Every structure is written in C-alpha cells, then in structure tokens.
Amino acid sequence: MKQEYYEYWDLQSGTPDGPLTEKEAKKLHDEQEMYVVVFKEGDTPKFVVKMQFRTWYCTVFHLNENRREKIIEAYSEMYDMYDKTGIGIPKGIENQIFLRNRQEKYFDKEGWNSWLYEVSGKYRRSYHSWSGGVLEREEGIEHVDTLIKDKPEFGDYWALLPEEGLS
C-alpha cells in the first residue's frame, strides 16, 4: 500500500486536493498544521489520515469502494482528556492519543452507529437514523487499552490503520 500527501481530502467527492511533496508534508507536520495522508492500493484510496493537531489530533477515514467514509475514528491527545490543573494526569501520556469518537456508517441500512469513549472506560453508543434522531442508545464499559495509541511520527501512520486493511 502506498501513501501520498495532500493539503485536503474532500469528503463529498472522495478526492484529495493540493498534492504535497514529502518534504512539504513534513514541514506541515513539524509546524502542527493540517495535512492528509492517503493510503492507496493501486489507484484506489483505502484510508485517509487527516492530521489536524487541534480538537482532534487526527482522524482516520476508512473508505468504501465508492470512496465514501464507512468508518471514521477521531483521536484526541491524551493530555486533553484530563483536567489541565494536573490533578489525576498519569505520567508518560504526552506522546499518546485516545480514540474519543468512532462512527460506522451503513449506507445499505437505515442508520449509522457512533461511539463516544472516555478515559475511564465508559462509552455511549448511539444508533442514528439517516433522517435524523437516535433510534437506539447503549452505555457500557470498555477496556481502554485498545483505545490508546502512540502519537504517529511523520511518515509512520500504520498503527492507526487496521491490520486486516494492510494486506
């Protein structure tokens, strides 16, 4: 799977915009400015990693055959998940991100799922209808180990992608 760098990914059209060289993308990464990395099999985009460095540190789009996002995973910096007074902040989290929000879209069904995770392990799942409104809600506890990842270094985004998608 090859990776290419761009300034932007247009969700509506499923196309990238503003090609970047690796050097230009690295500069944006170092300055914590937004850019996207498109992972392709041949000419077909499979995943888009949008590096934002803001409210969402990064967002990963898993694309379907029509280049529409079927899964969206939004990560926040671990430090942002805690009270900034420093109370209760675990050591060594400066270089970690946390899967805060996940959406799975079912274009052949009546709606889509979203999960909102907290570092305590609590989650809320909502099943939304395409016409608006929530059809179903669920709350529970999740092991947070799988929701925490190291911040990606420039050029090394593989830990954000599913293993089965890398074949």
Image (cartoon, rainbow, N blue to C red):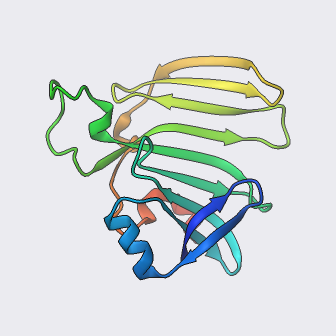
- Would residue 1 be seen by someone viewing this image from the given angle? no
- Which residue lies at the image location 72% right of the left edge and 26% below the top edge? 128
Q: Residue at x 70, y 49 (%)?
A: 70
Q: Is residue 11 left or right of residue 131?
A: left
Viewer-closest of 58 and 42? 58
**In the drawing, does residue 114 fall left or right of residue 74?**
right
Q: What is the number of callouts on the image?
A: 0
Residue 95 % position (x, y): 25, 52
Residue 106 pos. (x, y %) = 77, 41
Please provide percent x and percent y for residue 39.
58, 70
Q: Is residue 39 above or below residue 139?
A: below
Residue 144 x %, y %: 37, 35
Whether residue 51 sits left or right of residue 72 in the image: it is left
Residue drawn at x 64%, y 24% is 126
Comparing 124 with 33, the one in front is 33
- Residue 164 vs 146, above or below: the answer is below
Snapshot quadrant of residue 14: bottom right
Please tell me which residue is depicted at 72% across the width and 19% down the height of the picture.
Answer: 134
